[in-house]
Image: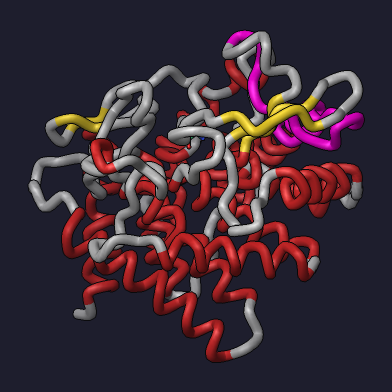
Amino acid sequence: MEWQEEALTRCLDKIEKNITEIGAYFPHVAYDGKYNHEEKKFWTSGFWPGMLWLLYRERGNEAAKELAIKLEKELDEILDGFIHIHHDVGFMWMPSAVMDYRLTGNKEAQIRGLKAASHLAGRFNPAGKFIRAWTDEVNPNAKGWALIDCMMNLSLLFWASKETDDPRFYHIACEHTDTVLKHFVRDDYTVPHIVSFDPYTGEKIEAISGQALNTGTAWSRGQAWAIYGMAVAYRETGKKECLNTARNMANYFLSHLPEDKVPYWDFRSTPDLQWVKDASASACVASGLMELSNLLEDEAEKNFYKKQGMEILKALYDIRFDNEPNSQAMILGGTVNCLKKRHINVPIIYGDFFFTEGLLKAQNKKGIF
Ligand code: GLY
């Protein structure tokens, strides 16, 4: 068996085992091979249902489908409760409700996806042409803040536009993308985590470091979100600027990877913090590179990005895969937030999700975002 088939089989086996191991909870980070139970309002709650749907799609596992639907219903409290909703609804409802709808035609799931998309569209600030990231609950002074992570949420808007045959969602996704191109992407094709705007006039105020070391550095997972999200924006809009930017941002990521293919948590990390790495950024970028490769026409370029994505996936499988038979986790060595000392060099659910999604895309199967 080729390594990638073996890796995918082992991922799907783990998901299958985790149906009872993890069950009806929302995992985020794992310690000693066991995932925690995160609050359902947290932005990561779509990844476990998404993994279940990938398993269902590959193997027709009915228990996976049942559990994914149960989790999707659990999230209604957040969707309909409104107050906790932030911009990460794409991360939450694309892998859960939208995947359900795509695979089963479930109309209730379609409505959930459209509600989530409407929430996201409702966060658009027309003066600054950006989607507001957080609620006052997270930070009352962030009414004018946009985050690079939001590039990954836009696929929900693109989906909703096609689903309703209504271009409003599409226009918002395009406006936000243009804002990112104009105000986030630096000359060297790195991006800050956060940019703040005056929420009344819409004027750009400044870049804010967020999870990065400082305002001028390059948080590696943010760079991965930007690459994958910008590739999706090109897929949906056909705008060449999105493609060129995704390609150049990917080139930065690839040319700054250490030999083990796992970046420091920030590409410009100071030497004292270089023991902190982020394998989840590698998993996310690998899946994003597969997306980018699929969109390119030139054969040599197509092959280049696919090969780079495969090399990252192989390095993750060879060096970071959790071989402990009883462990629920797949990819070791992700970092949630270095500066806040939150979950450093541990397995994270989105690392596992994007590793599995990347392996599937490598076999020319569709991803979720
Ligand atoms: N979306 C938040 C993060 O990547 O940590």
* 223 or 68: nearer the viewer: 223
Report the side of 183 relative to 266 (left or right): right
Q: Residue furthest bottom?
A: 299
Which residue: 69% across, 26% down? 145
What x and y, as percent, mark residue 61?
A: 36, 52
Vertical side of 135 occupied by 115: above or below: below
For the question of whether residue 18 can be seen, the reply is no
Magenta stretch containing residue 135, yes or no? yes
Which residue: 22% across, 69% down? 6
What x and y, as percent, mark residue 256?
A: 40, 61
Report the side of 312 relative to 33 (left or right): right
Circle count: 0
What colour scheme was applied to this rendering of the protein? secondary structure
Vertical side of 345 occupied by 7: above or below: below
What x and y, as percent, mark residue 369?
A: 59, 53
| Residue range (magenta) | 115-137
